[in-house]
């Protein structure tokens, strides 16, 4: 018997004991939020995973690998079953009576739960791929019945209706066309409606005389909506309105502001009674032309903004009646989820828990609170997580986004909750008709999620065909983090 094997077993025994102890308070705190049958086991697995990931496992991993045992690198959906299985094998190698070993059913129970919950949210998958497709509806879908028919013919699992655009009459026409397409093809499509949330946008903008584009080094004033004409500004200042006043009040000197998905970065230099004055620290060489209705992000500022606006509450009257699920923009806390669930209970008191909920993770606060947010949502109703990579990239930085989208995938798998890979998927193909090499690789990586979302564009249906083929190919090679070792066909 090798002393190294004994040492590894002792180290694993300590790790299991620490995980059980460290996760116990979290499991207890979450228990009151869980009402769905069967979800308590998923909550416990997430708690175990979070406790496990407080350890640096790399030395233990290498020791296990030399014995041909699991390196623990793919245990997200089955934390304790994996650890117990490895311990049972180490115990046998030590010549001791074998400890409890999970059955195959117990070992793969989390994987089974995740697959069931994905089907609950997105419906039965089209044959040939393991990832659902979610397609954003353009405004034209309200008056063009062929749009929904073409989606159904291509076996798209779900459609997204964005409540930030159009109105209830247009949404109803879209849904009517969808139902006709379903009857014509026999293919069911889920309806997810995205409530707009408190979007922070630019309003009116003004440039100094003789200038069109703001450049690095320029000063810019950010003022409240409707205030631009009432404020005397220096003639060499650019200026732009902000649709919400909260960021103007809470932003501090030194804080950053991003405009139009990060195309312009501003550092605040001075606060005034009417707003903020900042200096542009980065933009493209040719500068940026300021326009209304562009996104504003305040990543260094804690914003106390209600997640549900008055418009959202009005839209929920329609959404709760007609949609299969709701996409929740700007969710940042457990309280936000509780507010939405209370609003749904008012509109559908008997069966609001049947509505699925998609949590759009867009801010650092949402990331920090994600485990608790997941428990409040998925403990009550079918839930998915959307990696909203547009706003999230601006809020946490592009380098951190690459890391964070992996971590959100891991947390979703650990909680047995589906993840939607969204924002700029095959964007060049959708808009221009030809993909870039980078975005094809990105779309291939998206196969590790349970669903991929495509946005609208003139070449949408070409993109659907390409993505369908790509996801089908990737299903043969990869399941979550696990390579599928089918026979290679390029070399014989």
Image (cartoon, rainbow, N blue to C red):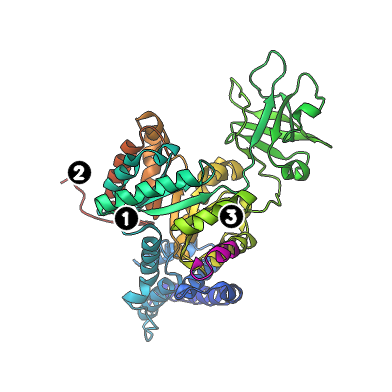
Residue 153 vs residue 40: left or right?
left
- In this rendering, the count of numbered labels is 3
Instruction: Mark 1 or mark 2: name the one nearer the start of the chain.
Output: 1
Residue 125 vs residue 325, the one in the foreground: 325
Name the spot of residue 443 as percent of width and height, x first: 38, 43
Name the spot of residue 297 as percent of width and height, x first: 64, 40
The residue tagged 2 is: 490
The residue tagged 3 is: 367
Residue 178 vs residue 214, the one in the foreground: 178
Whether tag 2 and tag 3 are in contact, CB under 8 A, the answer is no
Distance of mark 1 from mark 3, alpha carbons? 33 Å
Q: Is residue 374 above or below residue 10?
A: above
What secondary structure is marked by label 3?
Answer: helix
Query: Is disc 1 surrounded by few (<14), some (14 to 19) or many (20+) residues within 10 Å?
Result: some
The residue tagged 1 is: 188
Q: Nearer the viewer, mark 1 or mark 3?
A: 1
Q: Quadrant of residue 22?
A: bottom right
Residue 470 vs residue 169: left or right?
left
**Can you say which quadrant of the picture contains the N terminus?**
bottom left
What residue range appears in magenta? 341-352
Question: Which secondary structure class fits the magenta region best?
Answer: helix
Residue 368 vs residue 319, the one in the foreground: 319
Distance of mark 1 from mark 2, alpha carbons? 37 Å
């Amino acid at each position: 018997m090798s002393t190294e094997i004994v040492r590894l077993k002792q180290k694993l025994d300590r790790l299991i004991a620490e995980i059980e102890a460290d996760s116990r308070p979290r499991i207890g705190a979450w228990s009151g939020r869980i009402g769905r049958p069967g979800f308590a086991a998923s909550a416990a697995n997430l708690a175990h995973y979070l406790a496990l990931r407080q350890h640096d496992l790399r030395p233990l991993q290498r020791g296990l690998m030399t014995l041909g045992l699991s390196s623990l690198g793919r245990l997200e959906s089955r934390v304790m079953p994996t650890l117990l299985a490895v311990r049972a094998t180490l115990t046998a190698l030590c010549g001791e009576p074998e400890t409890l070993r999970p059955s195959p059913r117990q070992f793969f129970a989390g994987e089974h739960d995740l697959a069931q919950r994905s089907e609950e949210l997105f419906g039965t998958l089209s044959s040939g791929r393991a990832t659902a497709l979610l397609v954003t509806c353009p405004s034209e879908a309200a008056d063009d019945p062929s749009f929904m028919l073409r989606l159904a013919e291509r076996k798209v699992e779900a459609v997204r209706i964005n409540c930030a655009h159009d109105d209830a009459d247009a949404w109803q026409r879209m849904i009517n066309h969808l139902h006709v397409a379903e009857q014509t093809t026999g293919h069911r499509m889920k309806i997810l409606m995205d409530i707009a949330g408190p979007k922070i946008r630019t309003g009116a903008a003004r440039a100094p005389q003789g200038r069109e584009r703001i450049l690095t080094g320029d000063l810019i004033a950010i003022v409240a909506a409707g205030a631009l004409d009432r404020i005397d500004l220096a003639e060499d200042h650019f200026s732009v309105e902000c649709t919400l006043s909260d960021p103007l009040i809470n932003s501090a000197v030194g804080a950053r502001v991003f405009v139009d998905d990060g195309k312009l970065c501003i550092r605040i230099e001075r606060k005034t009674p009417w707003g903020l004055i900042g200096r542009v620290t980065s933009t493209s060489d040719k500068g940026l032309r300021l326009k209304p209705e562009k996104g504003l992000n305040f990543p260094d500022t804690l914003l106390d903004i209600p997640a549900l606006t008055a418009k959202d509450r009005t839209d929920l009257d329609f959404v709760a009646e007609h949609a299969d699920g709701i996409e929740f923009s700007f969710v940042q806390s457990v309280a936000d989820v509780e507010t939405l669930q209370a609003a749904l209970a008012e509109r559908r008191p008997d069966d609001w828990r049947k509505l699925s909920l998609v949590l759009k993770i867009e801010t650092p606060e949402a990331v920090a609170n994600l485990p608790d947010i997941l428990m409040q949502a998925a403990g009550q109703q079918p839930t998915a997580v959307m990696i909203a990579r547009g706003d999230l990239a601006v809020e946490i930085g592009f380098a951190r986004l690459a890391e964070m989208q992996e971590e959100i995938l891991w947390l979703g798998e650990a909680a047995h909750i589906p993840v939607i890979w969204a924002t700029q998927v095959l964007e060049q193909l959708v808009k221009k008709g030809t993909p870039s090499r980078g975005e094809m690789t990105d779309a291939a990586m998206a196969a590790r999620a349970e669903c991929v979302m495509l946005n609208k564009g003139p070449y949408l249906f070409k993109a659907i065909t390409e993505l369908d083929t790509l996801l089908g190919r990737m299903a043969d090679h990869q399941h979550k983090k696990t390579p599928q070792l089918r026979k290679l066909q390029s070399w014989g």
